[in-house]
């Protein structure tokens, strides 16, 4: 369910600007890498480390798997 298209829609970018979506099973985590509109540390950059970008993900409902 975690696709380039999903992240593009959530973050308002083109799907080709979502570089990769990686699943880390050991951590039960997903990582999406998205092209930054401003280079890290340049004037206007509001998140130098890119670590505060989780808000669009809060509305996702992930179905539970049947074990």
Image (cartoon, helix red, strand yellow):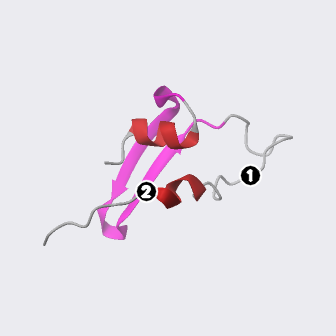
Q: Name which residue lies at 34% across and 67% down.
A: 28
Q: Badge 2: few (under 14), some or many (20 or more) residues near its Cα, within 10 Å?
A: few
Residue at image mark 1: 48
Labels 2 and 1 touching (C-beta < 8 A): no
- Where does residue 24 sit, x and y in percent of width and height? 35, 60
Identified at 46% across, 30% down, the residue is 15
| Closest to the observer, 42 or 8 | 8
Pick out the residue farthest to the left: 67
Task: Identify residue for label 2.
Answer: 60
Q: Quadrant of residue 55?
A: bottom right
Q: Quadrant of residue 12?
A: top right
53 is higher (above) or lower (below) than 12 = below
Q: Is residue 34 magenta?
A: yes
Q: Secondary structure at mark 1?
A: loop
Q: Is residue 46 left or right of residue 27?
A: right
Which disc is residue 22 wearing?
Answer: none
* Residue at x-position 36% and y-position 41%: 3
Q: Secondary structure at mark 2?
A: loop
> Bounds of the magenta span?
14-36
**Depth order, front residue of 48/54:** 54
The label nearer to you, 2 versus 1, is: 2
Which residue is outermost to the bottom? 67
- Taking the image as shown, residue 33 lies to the left or right of residue 64, namely right
- Number of marks in the rendered image: 2
Measured as percent of width and height from the top left, residue 58 is found at 51, 60
x, y percentage for residue 21? 40, 45
- Spot the residue most to the right: 43
Q: Relative to 9, is 37 on the left or the right?
A: right
The residue lying at 52 percent from left, 43 percent from top is 10
Q: Earlier in the sequence, mark 2 or mark 1?
A: 1
Residue 30 at x, y percent in the picture: 40, 56
């Amino acid at each position: 369910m975690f696709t380039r298209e999903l992240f593009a829609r959530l973050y308002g970018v083109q799907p080709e600007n979502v570089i990769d979506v990686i699943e880390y099973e050991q951590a039960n985590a997903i990582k999406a890498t998205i092209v930054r509109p401003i280079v890290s540390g340049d004037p206007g950059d509001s998140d130098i480390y890119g670590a505060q970008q989780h808000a669009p993900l809060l509305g996702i409902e992930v179905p539970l798997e049947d074990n």
